[in-house]
Amino acid sequence: MSIRHGLLALLERGPRYGSQLRTEFESRTGATWPLNVGQVYTTLSRLERDGLIVQDGSDDSGHDLYAITDDGRTELRTWFGTPVDRTSPPRDELAIKLAMAVGAPGVDIREVIQSQRRHTLKAMQDYTRLKAQALADVPADRDEVAWLLVVEQLIFQAEAEPRWLDHCESRLVRLAEAAATEPSAEPGPAPARGPARSIADRARAKR
Amino acid sequence: MPASTTPPPPASSGTPGGSPVLELRALTRTHGSGIAEVHALRGIDLSVYPGELVAVMGPSGSGKSTLLTLAGGLDTATSGQVVIEGQDISALGPKGMAALRRRSVGYVFQDYNLIPALTAAENIALPRELDGVSVRKARKEALAALAEMKLAEIADRFPDEMSGGQQQRVAIARALVGDRRLVLADEPTGALDSETGEAVLALLRTRCDQGAAGVMVTHEPRYAAWADRVVFLRDGSIVDQTVTTGADSLLAAGTTGADA
């Protein structure tokens, strides 16, 4: 889980206290995913329970300090060395919305697509402004470099959506044209097919 | 100029101001006639202001390239007007058109279109020389333009001695040398890799921030996102558009939405 490992990565640079970890996490990621202090302390207590960190005295101002353990370092190396799992995709509201919009009465699916496209392009414009600002001066410290990587991730991730929407739109146009020239292809009520199979099942069946 | 058909400038952070550099008014382009009639553009209204970069997106056949060729006076509208710096270009004769294209409008094409027998500096100086500027002054301007783009070292290279990204940056320098304030770019990043394409966009962005007006046709969302405004075309009509807000408001609002 990303907060857990993010905190471990910060603690590898030396003992730190809770609100300091929060500040450093946010400056690394440009406050893209703000943490509340409660989350930080909950995570720290779980890390401590699992033996990945220990309490390590306090600083001059009386803040309780935490330090990473050898097990914590091993856990962190494993995290960096393991790809993030993408094989069980989280539920995507847009995919569900488009799936439901196909043939839905009173819904213009092209308008659903366009309003999403506008929204996402707008978000990309805003991210790109941030990125242009970040690039105006050569990023100097590691927080600035890290923030640039994060904002570019937001742009690249967002970009997949208008590309997919463009594809959906032209796919729908082509299917409609095919249906128009071939009257028998008129979609009637779908035959009962038994329970739908997951994408993973289908992939396995194809092997 | 009549203000009635001119929409107010968009409230974007780029704060474009003044009179539009380019105005398209009820612009229509039809090919063929009768049963074979094809409407490439159907009544486009679009104003582009100094300091503004507009991206035009849409599926192939939606009229993107037609819009750009009409805006630059490379093709003639069936009806409607193209107004560049307050001047209706249909009122200009062929000579006036050529002068306008040379003095006010710069083009950037996907395949750079540099003249192979001329060096980078000569390519940039050529439109100025054609416009009656002395050879010496035109070269000085060209070198200054190259220096500004950190390309001074390639001034005397020929196009086949430059990378694609360098050629495209020279093409942008050529498009904006002199007093030209309107740049029309057709898929300017088409043949470039991601990082070079971005450098080209950053340059176009900078030139617009310095007061030029730009219209760019692209099918790449990531490049369109550099624009102040994204205009969506479908079947020859503008169906939608977006403006950017200030980056600061985005940060202030946080971006926790989808990922929290």
Image (cartoon, coloured by chain):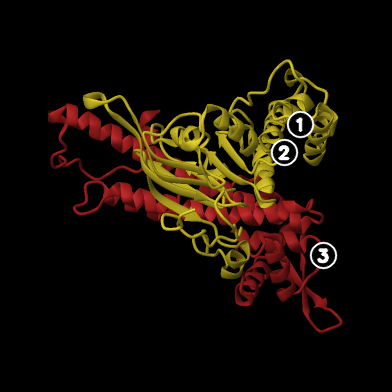
Chain colours: A red, B yellow
Chain letter for mark 2, please.
Answer: B
Residue for badge 1? B133
Chain letter for mark 3, please.
Answer: A
Residue B246, percent across and down? 60, 62
How far apart are labels 3 and 1 at the CA level?
65 Å
Q: Nearer the viewer, mark 2 or mark 1?
A: 1
Residue A199, percent across and down? 37, 41
Tell me the SS state at disc 2: loop
Which residue appears at 32% of the width and 50% of the height? Answer: A111
Residue for badge 3? A14
Chain letter for mark 1, please.
Answer: B
Tell me the SS state at disc 3: loop
Task: Name the amino acid type tagged 3.
Answer: Gly
Residue A154, labelled with which disc? none
Q: Nearer the viewer, mark 3 or mark 2?
A: 2
Residue A133, percent across and down? 70, 56
> From what the image shows, is residue B191 above or below residue A101?
above
The answer to whether residue A189 shows anywhere in this view is: yes
Residue B178, labelled with which disc? 2
Circles 3 and 1 on the same subunit? no
